[in-house]
Amino acid sequence: MSEHQHYILHKPYGYLSQFYLKEPHKKKLLGELGNFPEGIMAIGRLDEASEGLLLLTTDGKMSDYVNSQKVEKEYYAQVDGDISEAAISELQKGLEIGVNGQKYQTKPCKAFKISPDPVFPPRMKKIRDARHGPTSWVSITLREGKFRQVRKMTSAVGFPTLRLLRVRIGNIEIGESKSGEVFQVKKFDI
């Protein structure tokens, strides 16, 4: 039996967190970013408009562990407006969002305003410019991962997300990696 293979990927904006689609498509898929082995899967997902750290593996048990509520996932969100301390407090305490047409109460999480703004390479699609008002950055660290959860949370407190990057999963950080870079590792140091 061969050993499982593991990769760390800096997912670019505009890619789906999938390797293939059953129907014909014009979407960009992860398989275009490298030569991956059969049975590879993304651990968790980032939506097409999100960027950042994505772990890939052929090990289903590792995928289940990382997707569990035992492992923290940290996101940096650039939001519309200068996020208030009251909004940060709401994020920290947990709040109600919609998930699959149902109301869902998020669990308490770590959240804080990032200052000064983090520096990331420009995204392929421009966010917007200063004429539309200020933006700010917030760090949100979760142990859960509902569909578009961070975007729904920032919107619920009145500061919609303009750009979203996952910067950390457990002990693994995105660091200085560039968008689209892939690194094969022997194991994940979660």
Image (cartoon, rainbow, N blue to C red):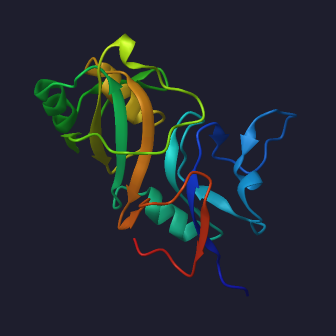
Q: Which part of the image, by quadrant, shows the N terminus?
A: bottom right
* Residue at (63, 46) in percent of width and height: 17
Q: Which part of the image, by quadrant, shows the C terminus?
A: bottom left
Up the image or down, 5 lies above or below 134; here it is below
* Residue at (59, 45) in percent of width and height: 12
* Whole-percent x, y for residue 123 in the image: 54, 37
* Whole-percent x, y for residue 180 in the image: 62, 53
Specify the quadrant of the image occupied by residue 153.
top left
* Residue at (42, 75) in percent of width and height: 189
Up the image or down, 45 lies above or below 159; here it is below
In the foreground, 68 or 18: 18
The residue positioned farthest toward the top in the image shown: 132
* Whole-percent x, y for residue 159 in the image: 30, 21
Count the marks. 0
* Whole-percent x, y for residue 182 in the image: 62, 63
The residue positioned farthest toward the right in the image shown: 24
**Residue 16 left/right relative to 178:** right
* Residue at (35, 68) in percent of width and height: 171
